Image (cartoon, grey):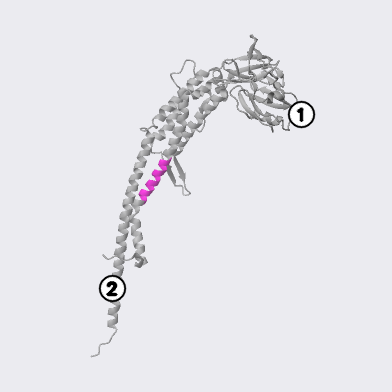
Amino acid sequence: MATTSISNVNTYFTSLINDLMAVERRPLTILQTRKTDLESKNSIFTDLGSKFSTLQSVVDDLIAGGGLAVFDKRAATVTPSTANKTVLTASASNGAAAATYTINVAALAVQHSVSSDQQSGVSQALNLSGTITLGGTALNIVADDTLNGIAGKINNASYSSGNAVKATVIDRKLILTANETGNDISASDTSGTALQTLGVLDGGGVFKNLLRTKSAASFTINDLPAISSGSNQGITAIGGITFNLAADAALQTATITVTADNSAIRTKAQDFLTKLNDLTTYLSEKSAITSSTNDQGKTTYKRGALAEDYSYSSLRGDLINDLSGSFYGLPSGAPTMLSEIGISLDDNLKFTVTDSSKLESALTTNPSGAKALLQKAAEKVDTLLKQFSGSSGTLTYSQKSVTDEIGYINAEVAGLNSRFAERRTYLEDYYATLQAQVISNIYLQQQLSSFGSFNVLG
C-alpha cells in the first residue's frame, strides 16, 4: 500500500483514526494507572522503611543498654549556707551514690605570683633585647617592646601543659601569675638581661618581688579530716562527684545533694513513644478504608494503599496489643504493665504518659524495675520490626515485588506504544489511500457527468 501523508487526510478520517486509537489504547491507560498506583505504594514503602529505621535505632539503644544508661544519670544540687555566695559548683557522673555532702572550705588554692619593679611608663619602648624563658617557653624581646607589649607576648605564647603564665600590668608593674595553682613560675634570662632589668629577677636569677607563693586549697567533707588540693578546679575527692571552688569559697560552707536525674529517662521514654506512635499512625492512615456520601445519598468507599496488605495492616494492631498487655520474665518487684508506670493508650490509640506522677514515682522508687519494663517493651517492638527489616524481611520483599511489577509494566507499555505507532501508521495509510480513491471516483463521476451534457446531432 502506498504511503500518503496524514496531513492530506480529511479531518473526518483523522477524527475517525483518533477514535479508533483511543479504543485500542485503553489497555495502555489501565497499565499506566496501575503503574501510578504502584509508584505511590513504593513511596509509602520508602516512608515506612524510614519510620522503621528511626524507631529501630531507639529500640536498639534501649535493648543494648546504651539508652537505658540514662537511668544512672545523677544530678548534683549545691546549696550554699550563706546567701549570695556561690562557694562551689558540682556535677555527678552516672551511677554516683545518692547522698548529701557538706563541704567546709578553710582556704582556696593560691597561684604563685611575682612582679617587676615599677617602670616609668607602660607604652614607651623599653630598649631591652634578648631572650627570656617563662614556663619553659622562649620569648624574643626587642628594643621597641613596651611593658604592655611584653605582657601581650607572654599571654599569646604557647606553653606545655601546666606551665602557662599569665601577665598583667598594674601600677606600671609587670605581674606574672602561674595559670595553675599547683605550679611555680619558672623564669630566666636566656640571653640579655631583660627580666633582671625589669626587676622580675635579681642578679642571682631569683625572683626579686614575690607577691605570693602557691598554696593548696583546704576543706573538709562531712567533718572528716581536712583534704588539700593543689587546684580549686576539678576536685574529685568524692567518688562520682567533681566540684569546683568558687572565688568566694574561703571560710564558707555548701551542701552537695546527689539525686537521680529522671529528666533524662523521661526524655528517652518519650522519644520511644513518639517514634512508636508515628509508625502506628502512619500504618493506620495507609491501611484505612474510608467512606463518603454524595448529595444523592450514594456512599463510596476508598481503600488505603496498604488495606489489602494484611502484614502491614495487622502490624499496628500487634504493636498496640503487645504493648498494652502484661510482660513476663521481669525481675521480682518490677512493674509488669506500662500502665503501672503511667504510660497508657489515649483515645486516639497512641501511647502517652497519661500519669506523670506515677512515672516519676516509678523512676524514683523502683528505677531498676522501670528500667527492666521499658527494656522488655523495646524487645517486643524489636521482635515485630525484625519481621520487616533486613534483606529477607517483609518490607524488602514488598519493595522488590512492586519494583519488579513496575519493570514489567514499563516493558509492556513500551511494546504497546511500538505496536500502537505501527497501527496508527497503518490506519493513516489506509484512510489516506481510501480518501485518494474517493477523490478519484469523484473526479471520474464529474468527467462522466460532463459527457452527458453534450447533444448528439445526427
Q: Which mark is residue 441?
A: 2
Q: Which residue appears farthest toward the front when viewing the image?
A: 192
Q: Position of residue 265 (x, y in %)?
A: 54, 24
The quadrant of the rendering that contains the C terminus is: bottom left
Q: Which residue is mark 1?
A: 120
Q: Which mark is residue 86?
A: none
Amino acid on which disc 1 is placed: Ser
Q: Position of residue 419 (x, y in %)?
A: 30, 55
Mark 2 or 1, closer to the camera: 1
Residue 110 versus residue 92: which sits nearer the camera? Answer: 110
Q: Which residue appears farthest toward the left when viewing the image?
A: 458
Alpha carbon separation for disc pair 2 and 1 = 126 Å
User: Does the rendering let one see residue 33?
Assistant: yes
* Part of the protein shown in magenta: 29-43
Magenta segment main secondary structure: helix
**Crowd band around label 1 with a 10 angstrom C-alpha radius: few (<14), some (14–19), many (20+):** few
Amino acid on which disc 2 is placed: Asn
The quadrant of the rendering that contains the N terminus is: bottom left
Q: Secondary structure at mark 1?
A: loop
Q: Which numbered disc, 2 or 1, marks the residue that appears first in the sequence?
A: 1
- Please determine whether, in this image, residue 448 is positioned above or below residue 320: below
* Residue drawn at point x = 31 percent, y = 54 percent: 418
Q: Position of residue 126 (x, y in %)?
A: 72, 30
- Please determine whether, in this image, residue 347 is positioned above or below residue 338: below
**Crowd band around label 2 with a 10 angstrom C-alpha radius: few (<14), some (14–19), many (20+):** few
Q: Quadrant of residue 78?
A: top right
Residue 356 versus residue 425: which sits nearer the camera? Answer: 425
Q: Quadrant of residue 383?
A: top left
